[in-house]
Image (spheres, rainbow, N blue to C red):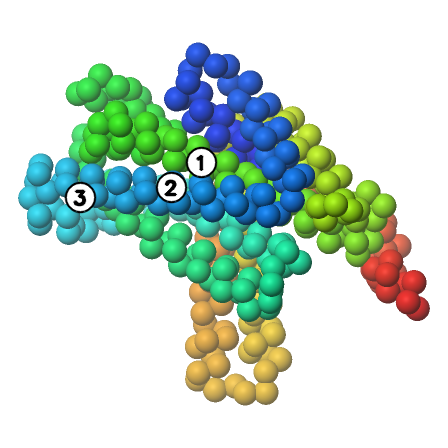
Amino acid sequence: MDYMFIPILCVIFSSVTANHLMPFIPYLFWIIFFTIGFSYLNLKGIKVASKANLIMMIVMSVVVFYFMAAAVRYVFVENGFGALFTTAPFYNADTFSFRAIGSATALAALTYIGFDGLTTLSEEVENPKRNVMIAVVMTCLITGVWSGLQIYLAQVSWPDWISFTNGTVDETGKTNTLDTAIMAVANRVGGNVLDASLSIMLLIGSIGSGITGQLGAGRLLYGMGRDNIIPQKFFGHLDKKSAVPNYNVLLIGGLTLVGANLLNYEDCALLINFGAFFAFMGVNIACIREYYFKSDRKNISSFLVSFLVPGIGFIVCLIIWLNLPLKTFVIGGSWLLAGGLYLLVKTNGFRIEMIPVDDLEKK
């Protein structure tokens, strides 16, 4: 469910941002345009998608540095050098709320969602045992550092008296909303040029994520099809020329087109988080089982590394997961139930082992 919602989310965000930049072009046009664009690039093969992502990453990096430099300059000019170092973005006694932090964290965690999708591209990578692991860890590390710095600088640049949530009009005459909050900050610290540049950067980033997300979803379905979990003839098919699971890419493209018309950004984000944090809790439990309970060494060091750290990870994920709205649990739980029933029928009441077709032929 997560992997199928990521390209839907990216198409929605790309379309909203493009419509913000060019409001004279209908929102529906952008949905169709980006869905077709993502599918086309992925059907051309991983190398084409990779080159497109590299170019977009370079452009985005330039804009990020531009935004951060402009924010530092704005704060320095307005309030002096000392204003750059404050605890206000982390804690404000007048507005602090655990419930607000919990729900906001669930949405902010979307920044990280998709890093695990890199593992679905293992068959496309040289030396995947080494390079995929490094890519996953570096993605999390860089995302955390850069996102944290950007949001910190955005917070110290924005006056407390202007709210994003109620459509307050600031002194420039602009109505501020939650969806365009970072653009409003960019406009304040760098004017219309930075506002437009950041909007374009967010659009480019969303396009890059959408391309990768669609291919990741297609690869995941291919792995399940190849292992005969789902029908192999369709889902386990690879294009002979590009080695891309083209049937799956087209299927995800079709679902994306429908989903982007029926859902909004927040609904997609929350549904992605439902599946992601449920899975992350499972990963933490698996780590404790594999590296602590099944290990021959049980000492203070192994307790701290193999039990306490994943245990804390499980609790943090559980808290965020429980702060998701009820509607998310209904939809996500229904999907989970449907998958369980499918597997129940497929394995004849969990009595038949799921064996890939290739392994059956060998036997």
Q: Which mark is residue 204?
A: 1
Q: CA distance from mark 3 to mark 2?
A: 18 Å
Q: Residue at x 85, y 45 (%)?
A: 233
Element on which disc 3 rests: helix
Q: Which residue is mark 3?
A: 72
Residue 109 appears anywhere in the view:
yes
* Left or right side of 24 for 68: left
Foreground mark, 1 or 3? 1
Mark closest to the chain's N terminus, 1 or 3: 3
Q: CA distance from mark 1 to mark 3?
A: 24 Å
Q: Tag 1, which secondary structure?
A: helix
Three-letter amino acid code at the position of disc 1: Ile
Residue 60's tag is 2
Q: Residue 229, image x and y in percent?
A: 80, 52
Q: Earlier in the sequence, mark 3 or mark 2?
A: 2
Residue 359, located in which quarter of the rendered image?
Answer: bottom right
